[in-house]
Image: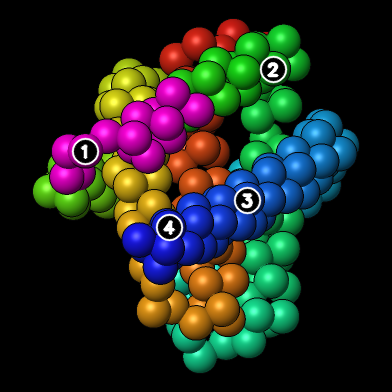
């Protein structure tokens, strides 16, 4: 009985520490991205680096698509990379995302951005709690949502060239359902990782960083989807 209680206490403590680290990475990434987006979100910066006389500058496409490669690298090669290098990639990812998000300060007014951020935070927190506490296995549900997300990502790239507002709105509405659902699914997956006893301390630290990255990505995508629906364009 004593061994069982000790094991349960150990599991609770490791889970608490794991999620503390996960959310520390997530909030750290949000802080870096938010600060850079706010500082770069002005017409002078956008006009100098992202838009030229011929239209959208190549640097803009680099800033938009480079995080995709960095995110995949972090998640797929974490076991071969040192924690220091992973952290450097994580910070670089957050900074690039901040630059890409800077354009929202040109398109939307600051009150709409602030309101949408708090709505996003509330929806995200609710689904995170649901995913952590539910006894229902969300694996099949999550797999389906990830397939829809891939389709949305491709559709979003196509719409960059189509520039269809109605198509973009449909993607945004679909995104709200997909990203809230994925938040619950991802929290359940992270809970399973946190409570797995045979993970080394180094791998647990790396996986907490990856967990923070995954939740950050879901939060940002949910925020952008809601902003597309709720935001008032300048």
- Residue on which disc 3 sits: 20
Image quadrant assignment for residue 149: top left
Residue 5 numbered mark, or none: 4
Q: Which residue is drawn at 76% across and 43% down?
A: 31
State which mark lies toward you, 4 or 1. 4
Q: Which residue is drawn at 57% across and 87% down?
A: 81
Closest to the observer: 67 or 196?
Answer: 196
Q: Distance between the residues labelled 2 and 3?
A: 25 Å
Marks 1/3 in contact by CB < 8 Å: the verdict is no
Residue extending farthest to the front is 1
Q: Can residue 197 be seen in this view?
A: yes
Residue 135 numbered mark, or none: 1
Marks 4/1 in contact by CB < 8 Å: the verdict is no
Closest to the observer: 125 or 213?
Answer: 125
Tag 4 secondary structure:
helix
* Circle nearer the N terminus (1, 3): 3
Marks 2/3 in contact by CB < 8 Å: the verdict is no
Residue 10 numbered mark, or none: none
- Residue on which disc 2 sits: 114
* Circle nearer the N terminus (4, 1): 4
Q: Distance between the residues labelled 2 and 1?
A: 34 Å
Type of secondary structure dominating the magenta stretch: helix
- Magenta residues span 125-138
Q: Distance between the residues labelled 1 and 3?
A: 22 Å
* Circle nearer the N terminus (2, 4): 4
Query: Eyeballing the image, is 155 above or below 204?
Result: above
């Amino acid at each position: 009985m004593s061994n069982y209680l000790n094991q349960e206490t150990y599991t609770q403590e490791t889970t608490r520490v794991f999620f503390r680290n996960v959310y520390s990475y997530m909030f750290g990434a949000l802080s870096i991205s938010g600060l850079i987006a706010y500082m770069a979100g002005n017409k002078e910066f956008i006009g100098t680096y992202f838009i030229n006389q011929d239209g959208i500058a190549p640097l803009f496409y680099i800033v938009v698509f480079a995080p995709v490669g960095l995110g995949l690298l972090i998640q797929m090669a974490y076991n071969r990379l040192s924690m220091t290098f992973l952290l450097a990639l994580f910070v670089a990812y957050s900074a690039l995302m901040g630059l890409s998000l800077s354009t929202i300060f040109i398109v939307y007014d600051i009150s709409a951005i602030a309101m949408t951020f708090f709505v996003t935070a509330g929806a995200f927190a609710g689904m995170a709690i649901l995913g952590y506490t539910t006894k229902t296995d969300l694996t099949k549900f999550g797999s389906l949502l990830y397939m829809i997300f891939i389709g949305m990502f491709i559709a979003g790239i196509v719409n960059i060239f189509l520039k269809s507002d109605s198509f973009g709105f449909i993607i945004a509405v679909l995104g709200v359902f997909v990203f809230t659902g994925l938040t619950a699914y991802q929290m359940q997956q992270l809970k399973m990782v946190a409570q797995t006893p045979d993970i080394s301390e180094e791998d647990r630290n790396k996986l907490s960083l990856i967990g923070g990255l995954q939740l950050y990505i879901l939060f940002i995508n949910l925020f952008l989807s809601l902003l597309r629906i709720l935001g008032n364009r300048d």
